[in-house]
Every structure is written in C-alpha cells, then in structure tokens.
Image: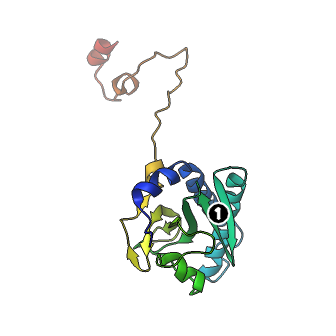
Amino acid sequence: MAFPQKDIVEPIIDKHRKTIVGAVLGAWKSWFESPHNGVWRCKRSRANFVWEEIVDRLHLAFEQLPDVRITRQNETFTFLLDELVLLRIKKGNAKGLSANVSTQLAFAFHDHGQDLPGLPEVQRVEIIYQLNHLETEIADVLVVGRNKQVMLWPPYSLLKSDEVVEHLPIPVSKDEPAKSTARDLVQPRDLPQKQKNKRD
C-alpha cells in the first residue's frame, strides 16, 4: 500500500502550479462570462462545464511536455507528472473533499490498497477547486491526498502560494516633480493667506 506523501508530491506539482491555477481560474472565468451562467438550472451542469474547460486547458498546456502523460479512464482524465504523481481535477466542498459519482474507478482512486491498472506505484492526489460562499468566484485551489474519506495530510493551497504582489513603478511626468506628498498636492480652502505665503 503506497499512500501519497506530501514531501514527494509537492515539489513535482509545484513545477506546474501556475499552469494548473491558470487552467482553473480561466475555466471559471469562461463559465462566469458564458451565456449559460444564470440560465442553466443545475449546479451539476456548471460543474461539468468548468471541468471540461479545465481539462481542455490542461491538455493544451501538457500534451507537448515529455514529463506529463495524459490518460483517459472511462469518463475522466488523469495527468501523470514525472511518472510518479497522478492527479485529477474535481470540485470540492469546504472540507476539501470532492464529490464523486460512485463508480469502481472513483472508489479505487482513493483506496490506496488498490492499484490502478498500469499504475501500481504512483502517488494519487486530487486538485480540487472551492467556490466562495456566494459561488461567484474561486476561493481556493487545493492539493488533496486522502485514503478513502480520511485526509492523509492537511490540503495545501496552490492559489494562495501563487499570490505574489509586484510593486510596479509609477510613471512620473517630466512636467511634475519626482516626489510629491499629500501636503504638496492638497491645499485646504480656508487656509489663511499668511499660512499660504509660508508654504509658497
């Protein structure tokens, strides 16, 4: 029995973190801007739309990479990274658990006492996306390792680790001083003439 180990999984997935996060956020944006948003009645339909969009984006990004193998298994796709980490994409709940159709493949994926056909020694994990309370945007993208319904380690975020704040330089016009303070820019209307003269 080979349980997925976070110290093995994390550095391998991290090489593709931006691609995975970009696929999830891009898929949600496509849904939110689609004519189906607010029209389709079932959340299942939305989940299928988003899943198709994510998988399509990952196909485009991964299919030319020598260290990624894409496999179709019945009605789902898995992505094998470095011949070691096998992942699939799902929508998850607040606890980090995905909702799966009760198929033999779904049971086998989370039961590490069972080997998947042709993939005996891989580390099997899920990438799940969570929605915010109003279901208007992606709240997080998590890597989940579990055995059946038991978490093997706390899920960790790909989205939050991707948040890097870049401080961009603010262009300054040649006609303006390079540095201005609020005091330079704002003058109270009722400032006495004497104080105005001091400032000038």
Residue 165 image-quadrant placement: top left
x, y (%) of residue 130? Answer: 48, 68
Residue 186 image-quadrant placement: top left
Judge whether residue 56 can be spotted in this image.
Answer: yes
Rendered residue at 36%/27% (across/down): 182
- Residue indicated by mark 1: 54
Q: Quadrant of the C terminus?
A: top left
Q: Residues within 10 Å of mark 1 (few under 14, many from 20)?
A: many
Relative to residue 78, is residue 15 depicted above or below? Answer: above
Q: In the rendered view, does 16 fall on the left or right side of 147?
A: right
Q: In the rendered view, does 79 fall on the left or right side of 150?
A: right
Relative to residue 111, is residue 176 depicted above or below? Answer: above
Judge whether residue 33 can be spotted in this image.
Answer: no
Rendered residue at 49%/76% (across/down): 110
Rendered residue at 65%/66% (across/down): 31
Relative to residue 113, is residue 155 depicted above or below? Answer: above
- Report the colour scheme: rainbow
Front one among 35 and 175: 35
x, y (%) of residue 179? Answer: 41, 19
x, y (%) of residue 121? Answer: 52, 66
Q: Find numbered disc 1 in the image and state the secondary structure of the residue it sits on.
A: helix
Residue 10 image-quadrant placement: bottom left
Rendered residue at 40%/64% (across/down): 155
Front one among 65 and 196: 65
x, y (%) of residue 74? Answer: 69, 78
Front one among 177 and 21: 21
Q: Quadrant of the N terminus?
A: bottom left
Q: Amino acid at mark 1?
A: Ile
In this rendering, the count of numbered labels is: 1
